[in-house]
Structures are given as structure tokens and as C-alpha cells.
Image (cartoon, rainbow, N blue to C red):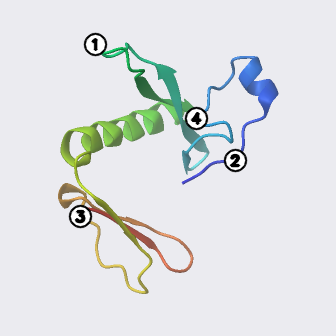
Amino acid sequence: MPGPPTGRSARERGIVTPMFDWGAMATVQGGSLAHLTLRPGKPTADGRKTYETGVIGHGPDGAALADLVSEQICTWNTDFRTRNLRIALPDTPGAADPAAGRFVLERPSHPITITWE
């Protein structure tokens, strides 16, 4: 889920390094927030740029939330990266099944179902 835009002054001071110019994807849990960040990785053998995704947590349980998001990124990279993505907004989404690649993002109306096929 997209998070709030990050002001340029926060980036310039090195407080945050958002993934995109407009800000960063983030999640909240209780009074904590975790957002994605990006840094250059090692170039490939043919000179192409690569990047590493990181997670930064803020708040009383920010480190634990960042660890949880990091674990989910690793699961996606290992198990689902090569699969196609399907996003749906059904009236009744059914149950989530993360092991099979089916995730349900609860919202007040029309939950979002994400399936890695």
C-alpha cells in the first residue's frame, strides 16, 4: 500500500530514502510503520544496474514490523517472483492462503485479493 509522500528535506537530510520520487510503499501496525527503501547493488557482469530493497521500521514495534515485511519480501523473491500477478476486488474475497500465493488485504469495503499464479 502506498504510504504518505516523503518531503524532499527528509531525503536530503538522509532521514529516509524512499524507493520512488513520490515516496515509498509502507505498512502500519498499531503505532508502528515500516517503509521500503532502495539502494544500488552490485552491477551485473554485463554492466547493468541492480538494486537492493530494504525495510526501515519506525515506532515502538518498528523493528519487528520491518522484520516481518523483510520476511515477506524474501518469501516473494524465493517462491513467487516468477509467477504472474492477478489483483481482484471481489465482494466476498474468500480466505487468504499465503503458502499458495493468495493474499487478502482487508479494507472497509471491497477487500483486495492478490494472487500469484
- The numbered mark, 3 or 1, whose residue comes first in the sequence reads 1
Indicate the amino acid at tag 2.
Answer: Pro
10 to 101, vertically: above or below:
above
Amino acid residing under circle 1: Ala
Q: Earlier in the sequence, mark 3 or mark 4?
A: 4
Q: Quadrant of residue 7?
A: top right
Going from N to C along the chain, the mark reached first, 2 or 3, is 2
The residue mark sitting in front, 4 or 2, is 2
Q: Contact, CB < 8 Å: mark 1 with mark 2?
A: no
Numbered disc 4: secondary structure: loop
Among the two numbered marks 4 and 2 on one chain, the one whose residue lies closer to the N terminus: 2
Tell me what residue is drawn at x 76 percent, y 17 percent. 13
* CA gap, disc 3 and disc 1: 38 Å
Task: Tell me the quarter of the image containing the N terminus.
Answer: bottom right
Which of the numbered marks, if any, corresponds to residue 4?
Answer: 2
Q: Quote the CA–CA distance across marks 1 and 2.
A: 37 Å
- Residue 45: give its label: 1
Q: Earlier in the sequence, mark 1 or mark 2?
A: 2
Identity, as a three-letter code, of the amino acid under mark 4:
Pro
Query: Where is mark 4, residue-wise?
Result: 60
Q: Residues within 10 Å of mark 2 (few under 14, many from 20)?
A: few
Assess disc 1: are there few (<14), some (14-19) or many (≥20) residues with their C-alpha within 10 Å of its C-alpha: few
Q: Position of residue 18 (x, y in %)?
A: 61, 32
Residue 116 left/right relative to 24: left
Q: CA distance from mark 3 to mark 4?
A: 29 Å
- The residue lying toward the viewer, choosing from 9 and 57, is 9
Left or right of 112 on screen, residue 1: right
Q: How many marks?
A: 4
> Which secondary structure lies at badge 2?
loop
- Which mark, residue 97? 3
